[in-house]
Amino acid sequence: MRTKRELPSGIYQRGASYYGRFKTPNGEVRRSLGRDRKKALAMFRRFREAGITPRSSATEAPRTTLEDVLDCYWQHQLRQHRDKPRTIENARHAIAKVKRLMDPAAPIETVTQDDFWRFREARAKEVRSTGSANVTLRYLKAALNRAVREGLLDLAVPGRAAAGATQAKPSPLTTPSR
């Protein structure tokens, strides 16, 4: 079995593309470096030579993993439903299924929508029912929502303006007033 080659700190691969994390005076920037490994590494070196420093994983705060999110949800279930053993048991089973079919050590910001679709398909093959797979997926969604409520995850997407800061686009159905 072939293992992934190590990438320098500050560069990571998601799917077939490579991305770089850089520190700039204005904060952190994430930038696509392309699909070709050699070109991505060359572009990464050029950024470093230009004085844009890579964000080192050794100096950054520990990342929130999928397991952290699931543990946060589990603790909430234990606190909230201590007098409902069946609810706790259902949550325990769903969390175990998620940990078995997805990588619990994966940083949550690297988990993509495709990962959720692959999880759903794998779970549907196990139980031969998309309905049962969707129930497990709802537990995962609840875990992510709980992590946001407890401040474990931030909904802010780098490079995008806050929801309230954007201007509303005019409706194509209305005519501009003169």
Image (spheres, rainbow, N blue to C red):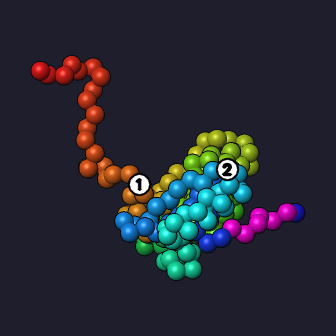
Label 1 packing within 10 angstroms: few (<14), some (14-19), many (20+) = few
Secondary structure type for disc 1: loop
**The furthest residue to the right:** 1
Q: Nearer the viewer, residue 165 or 132?
A: 165
The span shown in magenta is: 2-7
In the depicted structure, whether residue 76 falls above or below residue 160: below
Which residue occupies 74% across, 45% down? 125
Which residue occupies 39% across, 58% down? 156
Residue 144's x, y, as percent? Answer: 48, 59
Q: Nearer the viewer, residue 39 or 55?
A: 39
Q: Is residue 3 magenta?
A: yes
Marks 2 & 1, CB-CB < 8 Å contact:
no
Residue 25's x, y, as percent? Answer: 38, 69
Q: Is residue 130 magenta?
A: no
Q: Nearer the viewer, residue 93 or 145?
A: 145
**The furthest residue to the bottom:** 59
Secondary structure type for disc 2: loop
Residue under label 1: 159
Which residue occupies 58% across, 63% down? 46
Residue under label 2: 35
Residue 138's x, y, as percent? Answer: 52, 51
Quadrant showing the N terminus: bottom right
**Amino acid residing under circle 1:** Gly
